[in-house]
């Protein structure tokens, strides 16, 4: 048996952890540069707040409705996610972190009242973190996903649903929307419906050879999982990364070369840090800068940098990127976004050096390691001077909450 524990409206829930005055009140969280609504809590959904709407279009409407609006605070969300996973790890012998707000727990071999166990998980997480979670339990990962949706939608479930009986499984799947089955989605749902499969139960009962030939082996496995046959391993083997991309929109247009170079080098630093974290080397880079798509003067310029030898050296790459940005830059253009894409990645552990190439020296490798160690707990402790000390084009987050758990200067204050 597997359990899927999912945090309810993660971003919005994080905003209320250190603001008990907001619990039960409508909260929405905005995307980068305070662009669109990307998350909201249950109270905001009940009020009919439209998701993915540009903030400027609904700003006055949200104010009239008394909705509390926050910019994305990724530092806070990431830290609380880590604390959530640490809490959940105490409830099972094995755990697979699926996303920032979801984790699968392996209950195989454990004999206990699973519904009571699920309630204990909910109470412990809320006591430790002040965040609501729901628990879905099933014989396979797909069934635990189904159970998690039921735990979310059915109030009498009180946040826990356990599918451990064949009759119960049949009744749930007969009424479960096909597009909500893990791995199906809306486009595949239309194809299945055209062949007469309209419910999760019909998918589970369908001929497996037919599903494989007409759709894919993934759909066949999903059907078997809905029947209670495990086809998806508990720990998915991660696919090798093919690219690492860092792209941001500026808070205001840039027309000068130096600021454009400075921000692009900053994005390069973030991308190279991710590269080293995954123990990889890069052989090619793609740099681009573009103006707004919503103007008649839209233009996008890019430059490809091919390296003589694989590298993870931010310093060496910064020099090449500085030159590339200067080459693609066009005067009088209003740039609103730039991108750094690390391409042709290879695993550092499987790379054999070529004596005839100008390889990255060991001294550079050690320097990058020290740099990452210094920045491990607080980013930008050590950074390239070419990124600039301060600039006015960083991502706009005008309604960001404090970094309560990661900054000494922003610790929550308690008054008695």
Image (spheres, rainbow, N blue to C red):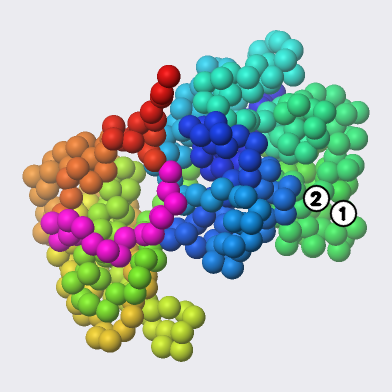
Q: Is residue 236 visible?
A: no
Q: Where 4 falls versus 183 (above or below)?
A: above
Q: Are marks 1 and 2 in contact (CB under 8 Å)?
A: yes
Q: Position of residue 174 (x, y in %)?
A: 90, 42
Residue numbers of the magenta segment: 385-401
Left or right: where 273 falls relative to 188: left
Q: Quadrant of the C terminus?
A: top left
* Residue lying at 44% horizontally and 51% vertically, measured from the top left: 399
> In the depicted view, which residue is nearer to us: 352 or 371?
371
Where, by quadrant of the figure, is residue 277 drawn? top left
* Residue lying at 43% horizontally and 43% vertically, measured from the top left: 401
Left or right: where 265 falls relative to 94: left
What kind of secondary structure does the magenta stretch mostly adopt?
loop
Identify the element where label 1 is drawn. Answer: loop
Other residues around mark 1 within 10 Å, as few (<14) / some (14–19) / many (≥20): some
Return the mark for residue 126: none
Other residues around mark 2 within 10 Å, as few (<14) / some (14–19) / many (≥20): many
Q: Is residue 264 visible?
A: yes
> In the depicted view, which residue is nearer to us: 91 or 277?
91
Q: Where 389 falls versus 96 (above or below)?
A: below
Return the mark for residue 197: 1
Q: Where 84 falls versus 192 (above or below)?
A: above
* Residue lying at 56% horizontally and 20% vertically, measured from the top left: 127
Q: Position of residue 27 (x, y in %)?
A: 59, 46
Q: Distance between the Cα atoms at labels 1 and 2?
A: 8 Å
Where, by quadrant of the figure, is residue 6 drawn? top right
Return the mark for residue 178: 2
């Amino acid at each position: 048996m597997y359990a899927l524990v999912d945090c309810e409206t993660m971003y919005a829930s994080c905003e209320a952890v250190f603001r008990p005055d907001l619990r039960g009140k409508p909260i929405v969280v905005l995307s980068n540069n305070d662009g669109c609504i990307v998350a909201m809590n249950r109270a905001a959904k009940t009020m009919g707040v439209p998701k993915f709407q540009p903030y400027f279009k609904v700003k006055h409407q949200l104010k009239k409705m008394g909705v509390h609006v926050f910019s994305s605070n990724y530092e806070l969300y990431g830290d609380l996610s880590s604390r959530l996973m640490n809490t959940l790890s105490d409830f099972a012998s094995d755990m697979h972190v699926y996303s920032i707000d979801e984790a699968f727990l392996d209950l195989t071999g454990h004999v206990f009242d699973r519904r009571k166990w699920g309630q204990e998980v909910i109470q412990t997480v809320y006591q430790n973190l002040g965040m609501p979670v729901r628990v879905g339990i099933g014989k396979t990962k797909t069934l635990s996903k189904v159970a998690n949706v039921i735990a979310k939608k059915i109030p009498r479930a009180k946040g826990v649903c356990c599918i451990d009986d064949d009759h119960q499984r049949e009744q749930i799947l007969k009424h479960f929307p096909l597009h909500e089955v893990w791995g199906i989605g809306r486009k595949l749902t239309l194809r299945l419906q055209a062949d007469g499969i309209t419910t999760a139960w019909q998918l589970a009962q369908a001929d497996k050879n037919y599903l494989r030939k007409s759709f894919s082996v993934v759909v066949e496995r999903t059907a078997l999982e809905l029947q209670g046959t495990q086809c998806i391993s508990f720990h998915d083997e991660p696919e090798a990364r093919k690219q690492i991309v860092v792209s941001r929109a500026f808070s205001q247009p840039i027309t000068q070369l130096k600021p454009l170079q400075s921000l692009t080098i900053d994005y390069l630093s973030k991308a190279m840090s991710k590269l080293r974290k995954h123990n990889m080397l890069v052989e090619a880079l793609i740099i681009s800068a573009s103006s707004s798509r919503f103007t008649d003067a839209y233009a996008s310029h890019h430059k490809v940098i091919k390296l003589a030898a694989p590298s993870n050296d931010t310093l060496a790459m910064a020099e090449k990127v500085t030159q590339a940005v200067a080459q693609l830059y066009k005067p009088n253009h209003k740039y609103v976004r730039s991108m750094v894409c690390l391409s042709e990645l290879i695993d550092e552990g499987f790379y054999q050096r070529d004596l005839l190439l100008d390889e990255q020296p060991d001294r550079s490798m050690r320097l990058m390691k020290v740099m990452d160690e210094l920045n491990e707990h607080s980013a930008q402790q050590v950074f390239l001077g070419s990124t600039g000390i301060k600039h006015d084009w960083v991502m706009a987050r005008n309604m960001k909450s404090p970094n309560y758990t990661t900054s000494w200067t922003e610790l929550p204050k308690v008054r008695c």
